[in-house]
Image (tube, rainbow, N blue to C red):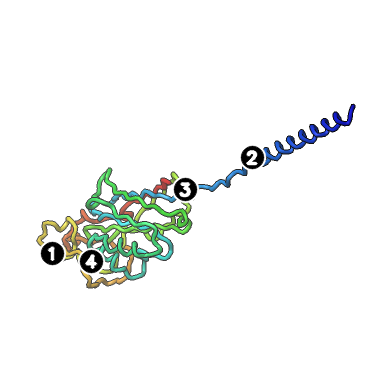
């Protein structure tokens, strides 16, 4: 083999090695690093709240329901009622409580049932939906109130019931007691009871009154009515408006 041929073969080998190196380098350059997968943001929690009237003769005013943390309180037994609660218990008015809740940084959601009073009777119910941010679920509590219409200042209520352990699809049922707001004396008169039982009485049927004159001036379990049938001369109520506890059934279902 001549030197010329050896030289030519050597150049060919060098060129082939260079091409192989280039191919390997190109293959390495085209390898892509997978983009990091971002986990989906936690979903908000949603709860359907349904109220059923268990009494025989007490309409319930549209309920106000509030989802909140420990920094908010709708009412506490043994403590004076807020003016907002007084409006509910004496007149069935929810505007003040809804405003109080919406102004609080400790409240996640507020809802007021639509329509008129919730009357006794099979199949009658009222519902609202509350949505709680995912980050607030661990501390979420539920409070609600609804006036017993044929009373001076009675209401069905729930205070700070925890929602944190309720799984999606699960349901919680709470039997509600009747409370007295401690803001108005239980005269049961046609001038001071605004419900339908006094509609034809000719009385004033006053709702909210800022003056507080109850014997017990804090929220407490309601003693029930006496009625004219049982000897209370001032009463515009009859035994038809009496009740036993529980006065209402509250169902809480987590839907999301």
**Which residue is at the far top?**
1
For the residues marked 3 and 4, what is the alpha-carbon distance in whole angstroms? Answer: 42 Å
> Could you tell whether 34 is left or right of 117 in the image?
right
Dot 4 alpha-carbon crowd within 10 angstroms: few under 14, some 14 to 19, many 20 or more: many
Q: Quick one: SS at disc 3?
A: loop
Task: Give the residue number, with chain letter if any, for mark 3.
Answer: 167
Q: Which mark is residue 232?
A: none
Q: Given contact means CB atoms under 8 Å apart, are the residues at marks 1 and 3 in contact?
A: no
Q: Please determine whether, in this image, residue 40 is positioned above or below residue 152.
A: above
Residue 230 at x, y = what percent? 20, 60
In this rendering, would 256 be left or right of 219? right
The mark closer to the camera, 1 or 3, is: 3
Q: Note whether 3 is above or below 73 in the view shown.
A: above
Foreground mark, 2 or 3, reads: 2
Q: Which residue is mark 1?
A: 204
Q: Position of residue 99 (x, y in %)?
A: 30, 63
Say which label, 4 or 2, has the lower sequence index: 2
User: How packed is label 3: few (under 14 Cα within 10 Å), some, or many (20 or more)?
Assistant: few
């Amino acid at each position: 083999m001549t030197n010329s041929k050896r030289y030519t073969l050597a150049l060919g080998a060098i060129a082939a090695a260079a091409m192989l190196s280039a191919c390997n380098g190109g293959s390495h350059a085209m390898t892509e690093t997978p983009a990091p997968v971002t986990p989906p943001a936690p979903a908000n929690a949603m709860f359907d709240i349904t109220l059923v009237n268990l009494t025989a003769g007490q309409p319930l005013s549209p309920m106000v329901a509030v989802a909140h943390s420990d920094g908010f309180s709708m009412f506490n037994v043994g403590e004076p009622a807020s003016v907002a609660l007084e409006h509910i218990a004496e007149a069935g008015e929810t505007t003040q409580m809804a405003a109080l809740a919406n102004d609080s940084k400790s409240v996640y959601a507020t809802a007021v049932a639509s329509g008129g009073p919730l009357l006794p009777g099979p199949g009658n119910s009222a519902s609202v939906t509350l949505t709680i941010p995912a980050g607030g679920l661990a501390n979420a509590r539920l409070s609600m109130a609804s006036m017993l219409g044929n009373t001076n200042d009675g209401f069905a209520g729930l205070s700070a019931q925890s929602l944190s352990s309720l799984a999606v699809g699960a349901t919680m049922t709470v039997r509600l007691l009747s409370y007295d707001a401690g803001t108005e004396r239980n005269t049961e008169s046609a001038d001071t009871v605004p419900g339908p039982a006094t509609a034809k009485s000719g009385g004033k049927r006053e709702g909210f009154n800022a003056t507080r004159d109850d014997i017990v001036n804090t929220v407490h379990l309601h003693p029930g009515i006496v009625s004219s049938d049982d000897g209370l001369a001032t009463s515009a109520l009859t035994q038809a408006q009496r009740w036993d506890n529980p006065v209402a059934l509250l169902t809480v279902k987590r839907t999301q």
